[in-house]
Image (spheres, helix red, strand yellow):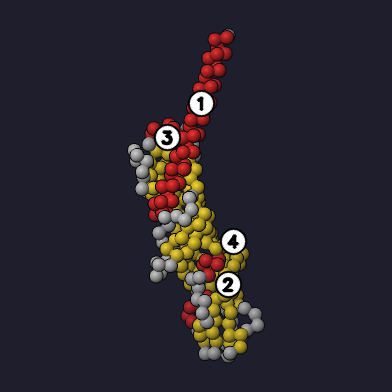
């Protein structure tokens, strides 16, 4: 019995040391991966990298990680317009089947899916901010975007009719969709400018707009979008996503 107790104690101690070594190794690897991702994507701050699964060391021996979660607080995505960018908030991506090179200088995920948010203030930069004539004697411009409920965006328009600004801004509910790498905002109905008739295409030149979002981290792509309280929530996905190198 005494020998058995000693054996069990040794097993427990060795098991504890293995777990400790495994956790130390994964923490080190997460830090290294975060630094490489920051350098690869030219990020302003270090992202969060979390390697899932246990034990980590056996995954390393196999040359592939089952599940890696990446979080980027702020990401400046290009828009394809004169070098302009749009800020993507709280980008979180779940990477599956991450294979890495022997010297750990590069890593690629077989698939990835995730979420992020575009604040309404960011998306508003895309809309026309200057007053534009939509009918004889009528000018209008978008002055605000907000949550319209039920997955819609509320677009607020300031209008001037025959030189007089309307006392209250106008608003319309709009549908937001993703088509390829473009986010589109399309008014479900058009505002009325104090009884003055305006051509639909002229009004939509104000109420409807789009924003291209290109060069997301690792080559992930837009998948879907939906209006929410804090902004437009986007879904992303990709395959053969580059994490580093």
Crowding at mark 4 (Cα within 10 Å: few <14, some 14-19, many 20+): few
**Crowd tier of the residue under label 3, counting other residues whose Cα lies within 10 Å: few below 14, some 14–19, many 20 or above:** some
Callout 2 crowding tier (Cα within 10 Å): few <14, some 14–19, many ≥20: some
Most distant residue in the left direction: 102
Residue at horizontal 65%, vertical 80%? 168
Q: Quadrant of residue 229?
A: bottom right
Quarter residue 66 falls in = top left
Nearer-the-camera pick, 73 or 62: 73
Cα–Cα span, label 4 and label 3: 38 Å
Circle 1 or circle 4, nearest the eye: 1
Residue identifier under label 4: 230
Residue placed most toward the observer, 134 or 82: 82
Mark 1 Cα-neighbour bin, 10 Å: few <14, some 14–19, many ≥20? few
Disc 1, SS: helix
Depth check: 244 or 232 in front? 244
147 w.r.t. 99: above or below:
below
Residue 92 spot, x, y in % from top left: 50, 51
Q: Which mark is residue 59?
A: 3
| Mark earlier in primary sequence (4, 2) | 2
- Disc number placed over residue 36 in the picture, else none: none
The dot on residue 17 is: 1
How far, Cα to Cα, is label 3 from label 2?
50 Å
């Amino acid at each position: 019995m005494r020998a058995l107790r000693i054996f069990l104690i040794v097993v427990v101690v060795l098991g504890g040391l293995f777990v400790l070594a495994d956790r130390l190794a994964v923490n080190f690897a997460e830090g290294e991966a975060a630094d490489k991702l920051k350098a690869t994507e030219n990020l302003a701050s270090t992202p969060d990298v979390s390697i899932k699964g246990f034990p980590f060391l056996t995954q390393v021996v196999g040359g592939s990680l089952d599940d890696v979660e990446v979080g980027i607080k702020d990401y400046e995505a290009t828009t394809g317009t004169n070098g302009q960018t749009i800020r993507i908030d709280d980008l979180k991506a779940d990477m599956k089947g991450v294979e890495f090179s022997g010297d750990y200088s590069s890593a690629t995920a077989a698939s990835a899916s995730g979420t992020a948010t575009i604040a309404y203030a960011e998306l508003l930069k895309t809309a026309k901010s200057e007053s534009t004539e939509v009918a004889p004697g009528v000018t209008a411009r978008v002055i605000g975007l907000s949550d319209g409920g039920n997955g819609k965006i509320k677009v607020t328009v300031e209008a001037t009719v025959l030189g007089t600004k309307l006392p209250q801004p106008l608003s319309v509910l709009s549908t937001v969709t993703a088509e390829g790498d473009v986010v589109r905002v399309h008014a479900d109905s058009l505002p009325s400018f104090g009884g003055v008739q305006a051509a639909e295409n002229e009004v939509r030149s104000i109420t409807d707009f789009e924003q291209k979002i290109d060069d997301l981290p690792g080559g992930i792509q837009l998948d879907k979008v939906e209006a929410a309280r804090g902004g437009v929530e986007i879904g992303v996905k990709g395959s053969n996503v580059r994490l580093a190198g």
